[in-house]
Image (tube, rainbow, N blue to C red):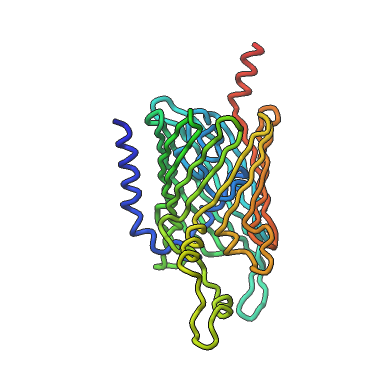
Amino acid sequence: MKIRYLLLLLFVVFLITPPVSRAQIGGESTYKFLNLTNSARIAALGGNYLAVYDKDITLSLANPSLINEEMHNSLGFSFVNYYTGINYGFAQYARTFSKIGTFVASMQFVNYGEFVRADQTGEQNGTFTAGEYALNIGWGRRLHPHWSIGANLKGIYSSFEAYNSFGIAVDVSGSYIHEEGNFTASLIARNIGLQLKSYYSGQTHPLPFELQFGMSKGLKHLPLRFSFLYHNMQKWDLTYKDPLVVAENTDPMTGEEKKQSGIGDFADKTMRHIVIGAEINITDFLSLRGGYNYGRRQDNGVQSKMATVGLSWGIGIRVSKFHFSYARSRYALVGSPNYITLTVNLQEFTRKRTAVN
């Protein structure tokens, strides 16, 4: 029975989790750009991962088990205007081969801009650039009417002035799809790999491994879909202790830190893993999206003025054969990155030409 292959895949994921999950949060790993959100649709729903089984090619990089034959001959382009002159983008193309499955080739880049080169005394000596790149080959296949699997193979190159590094990584995932119930659930292990060449000789670093679970459910009589993501399953405590905040919460008499109650602490740690989102299709040509990321709000917000940190929103528009998506995600008070995605299926142009002939 083909389901046993999916169960075997998930067992392998859990088997490899312990040795690679020790140091993955807060600057303890390299190639963090691999976790950048690659789709305006995903960004609008609050995270970097989505479990929605449709023909949107931009979901394939975040969750390869969503790759399916309806993506055949699709193109996808995304561009993100990030912070302080940093920008990054993606280009994707899908092709289906009978009896093998569907493949998606993706090119990812991050441009950190131009910097002034200076020595220890401050004397300037020209400029230099910095950037990171990844070439991804994704594969997905439906094993059963309700089960799908997929994987991404990533070749990684990173360059900062005269320092460069090479690496390789793999994503593996499995999805349960119930199309009649409009429900999808996925489990994915991301960035399983290693640094083949480090920036400094003899100083290798782990990759940003992450285990995620997501699901989505569409309502039966309303064009509304809810999404749920539980990220960083490999690590329970995602809190960051700011030394300044710890000092403010320290009892001056006892020197002990004031902590939340047991229930409050458990709820806080749980919610830091959770991202929720909703998408409503107003018409066949217009979609509205929104999301909430509690962990992002707690980590990046200012307690005296949280504003809309952690919230995100977006819009999807179809014009002729082109699908355009735009999103803004509030990471901090300093601003919100702009996400732009354009997708098109080249098959639609072929169908029109055939119809005319």
In the foreground, 219 or 195: 219
**Can you say which quadrant of the picture contains the C terminus?**
top right
* Residue 347 % position (x, y): 58, 24
Residue positioned 56% across, 78% down in the render: 249
* Residue 325 % position (x, y): 66, 40
| Residue that lies at the very extreme toward the top in this rendered image | 357
In the foreground, 196 or 242: 242
**Tally of marks:** 0
**Can you say which quadrant of the picture contains the N terminus?**
top left
The answer to whether 107 appears left or right of 190 in the picture is right
The answer to whether one can see residue 149 in this image is yes
The answer to whether 212 appears left or right of 344 in the picture is left
Residue positioned 46% across, 63% down in the render: 266
Looking at the image, is 216 positioned above or below residue 19? above
In the foreground, 143 or 92: 143
Splitting the image into 4 quarters, where does residue 91 fall? top right
In the foreground, 107 or 333: 333
Looking at the image, is 55 positioned above or below residue 205? above
* Residue 143 % position (x, y): 37, 31
* Residue 258 % position (x, y): 51, 77
The answer to whether one can see residue 199 in this image is no
Residue positioned 42% across, 60% down in the render: 235
Residue positioned 53% across, 42% down in the render: 106
